[in-house]
Amino acid sequence: MQFLNFLLPLPVVLLQLAGVAHAAPRGSNTTILPGAVVHKSNGFEWLSLPSSADLSHPALNLSSLLELSAAGRPLPSLPSGIPAPSRLSDLIGVHADAATTIHCETSDASPYRMYSEKMLKTMKQLQHQWCCVDKPKDGTCRMMLMSGYPKPGAAATDICNYTPHNHICLNCGAAAWAIEVIIDKCTEGVALNRQAGGYVKFNDVVVNLYTKWA
C-alpha cells in the first residue's frame, strides 16, 4: 500500500497499525467468514484479513477512498465475504468503553496539533469505512496516514497489532476517535506551537499519534 501525502482539498495525511496481545475481554468474540475474521469486543470491531486479500480493491485501499471522498463521489462496496463495520461500532460510547488505555507522551518532539487536526478531519470523512493496512514487513506496525510532512512537527498516526501475517482493518471512525482523544487530553504548549502525542489501546489494537520525521 502506498503512503499517502495529499496536497488537495484534503490535508496531507498518513496512518500506520500497532497492537499488543491481551486476554480476551468479557463480551469478546470472533466470527470467521470466507474473506475475514471479525473480532468484536462489546461492540468494538476490527478485521483480520488473510495475506492473500487484495488491498488494491478500491473499498480496502485508503488512497482510493480518500480520493473518492474528496471528489464527493460514492464509495465502493466491499468485496464478497468482508462485512462493513456495524453501526454499533460507530458509536462514540463503544470506542470509549473499548479503550483500555489512553496514554499521553507529549514532548518537544511531538507533532504540532494543527497537523494532527487536519489528519483528524480527513479520518472523520471516512466514518463507517474500514481503514486497512498491509501486513507489516518488520515488527507489528504499518504507516498509512500523515499530515504536514516534510515540515517540522508533521503528524502521523499508526495502528498496530501483533498478527504480522495478516492485513488489519480498523473502523476509520475508531481511529479518528483515538486521534481526537489524544489531541484533547495530551495537548501542551501555546498558540501554533501546541503539541500532542500518545496512544490509545483498544484491547488488541493500538492507535498512535506521533511525529513523522524526514
Image (tube, rainbow, N blue to C red):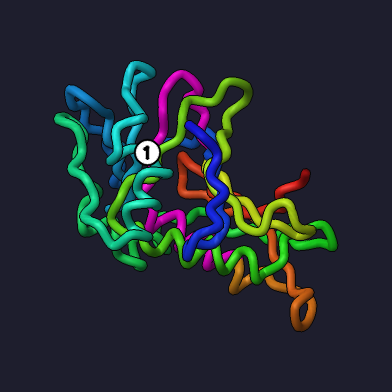
Residue 172 falls inside the magenta stretch:
yes
- Spot occupied by residue 31 in the image (x, y as percentages of width and height): 21, 32
Q: Residue at 28% of width from left, 41% of height from top?
A: 59
- Spot occupied by residue 145 in the image (x, y as percentages of width and height): 54, 48
| For residue 107, side relative to residue 52 (left or right) | right
- Spot occupied by residue 82 in the image (x, y as percentages of width and height): 21, 34
Amino acid bearing label 1: Asn
Residue 184 falls inside the magenta stretch:
no
Camera sees residue 117? yes
Camera sees residue 26? no
Number of numbered callouts drawn: 1
Q: Residue at 53% of width from left, 45% of height from top?
A: 4
The residue range painted magenta reads 160-182
Q: Nearer the viewer, residue 164 or 101?
A: 164
Residue ranking furthest to the left: 80
| For residue 15, side relative to residue 48 (left or right) | right
Quarter location, residue 115: bottom right
Q: Nearer the viewer, residue 83 or 12?
A: 12
Q: Is residue 80 above or below residue 197?
A: above
Q: Is residue 202 above or below residue 20?
A: below
Which quarter of the rendering shows the C terminus?
top right
* Crowd band around label 1 with a 10 angstrom C-alpha radius: few (<14), some (14–19), many (20+): some
Q: Residue at 50% of width from left, 64% of height from top?
A: 120
Quickly name the residue at label 1: 61
